[in-house]
Amino acid sequence: MPVYNFGAGNPDPGSFPSQALAEATARVLEGAGETLVTYPDPKGHPPLREIAAERFKKNNGIDLPVDSIALTTGSMQAISLVCQAFLHPGDSIVTEEFSYSGSINCFRKFGVRMIGIPVDDEGMNVDALEEALKDLARRGEPLPKFIYTIATNQNPTGTMMPVSRREKLLSLAQSYGIPIVDDDCYADLLFGEPAPTSFYALDPDSVIYIGSFSKIMGPGMRLGFFAAKEETLAQVLYWKIDGGTNNFAAYVTAEYLKDHLWDHVREINGIVKGKLDTVVQQLDAQPDAFLGHSNPKGGLFIWVKLPEDVDPVRVLELATERNIRYGTGKAFDSQGRDVKYLRLAFGYASHRDFEEGLPLLADCVREARAITLEARV
């Protein structure tokens, strides 16, 4: 029986530049092989940090000083380091009501309380955030240690926060003295208009910026980065005790991307946009099972609404029996509720997978609804 993997937030496997990376590896080993017997720069391989700065300037229109950037083992290490630097058990943070499951799990392991702010078609509802902060102040409770947000191509909802909302969120954070952790790891995956300016570009003094190479190369490369003002960068790097980010992977990635970055980004965006179109077509063809979905302008994920009278746990059981994998709503809910949503990743699976697997998933929803209705009779 085929496996339909709609759960993995991976790029298209055919977009991985194996041959070009093999050639880049040969050049690295010939020209810089001896340097790999030493430990990396504490901030990581400078040429790859320069590429991170180039990406940031193209996306935001301003310079990102290379000295303010530090490489990490994927963007998740950056999130974990920020938690180590800022959090203690019992603290609180703000996040979107629905957020990346890896970040949620990280926050839980640090023993903090997540204040989940509702998400609408334009990302975090900033009016609801304002009310939450006012309520904390009225009750005399400690303010959150930071606001964590994925404003561009939000995971899991696929929403894009407009610039007006970003400016208001930043103004709120500044007025309460709360830092922002700007998780921008999907910044390059855009299918049309450029994304609004990132929080870090608006205020580098109070924002920690997190980026990733995983979404344009592959999570197996384990390369991410973060940027912050000098004092904050040092505060976070204090906890990075791994001896340095993989220099070999960083050398090879930098050697490849120095000549291919934007062509590669354009290629993968074209591939992934085509897959999204197929997913939307299949979802819209099953309106009784999939009541609605977000409309991503980029990224790798679409957020799908299930019927109110369906048990999402039963849907998962039926889907697992048919080798269908996806992200449950519960996995992305900051409060751990069995919400009536699911997340589909549209970068990794094939068009055929979606054409075959999504109708099967719709059948699972229908069967779960029927079981629920029978139980009520």
Image: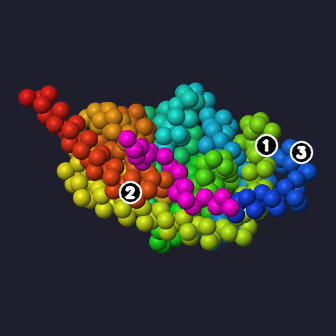
The one of 346 and 212 positioned closer to us in this rendering:
346
Write the residue at 89% across / 45% down.
37
In the image, 224: left or right of 243? left
Closer to viewer: mark 1 or mark 2: 2
The tag earlier along the polypeptide, 2 or 3, is: 3
Mark number, residue 352: 2
Q: Position of residue 30 (x, y in %)?
A: 87, 59
Mark number, residue 244: 1
Q: Which residue is farthest front?
A: 1
- What number of labels is visible? 3
Residue to which mark 3 is pinned: 37
Looking at the image, residue 299 lies above or below residue 232: below
Type of the residue with mark 3 = Val
C-alpha separation, residue under disc 1 versus residue under disc 3: 13 Å
Mark number, residue 267: none
C-alpha separation, residue under disc 2 versus residue under disc 3: 45 Å
Write the residue at 76% across / 37% down.
242
The crowding category of the residue bearing disc 3, from other C-alpha atoms within 10 Å (few below 14, some 14 to 19, many at least 20), is: few
The stretch drawn in magenta includes residue 8: yes
Q: Position of residue 133 (x, y in %)?
A: 46, 44
Q: Are marks 2 and 3 in contact (CB under 8 Å)?
A: no
Type of the residue with mark 2 = Arg
Indicate the secondary structure of the residue bearing disc 3: helix
**Range of residues picked out in magenta:** 1-19
The one of 324 and 352 positioned closer to us in this rendering:
352
Write the residue at 50% across / 49% down.
9
Q: Position of residue 247 (x, y in %)?
A: 79, 49
The stretch drawn in magenta includes residue 286: no
Decide if residue 117 is in sight here.
no
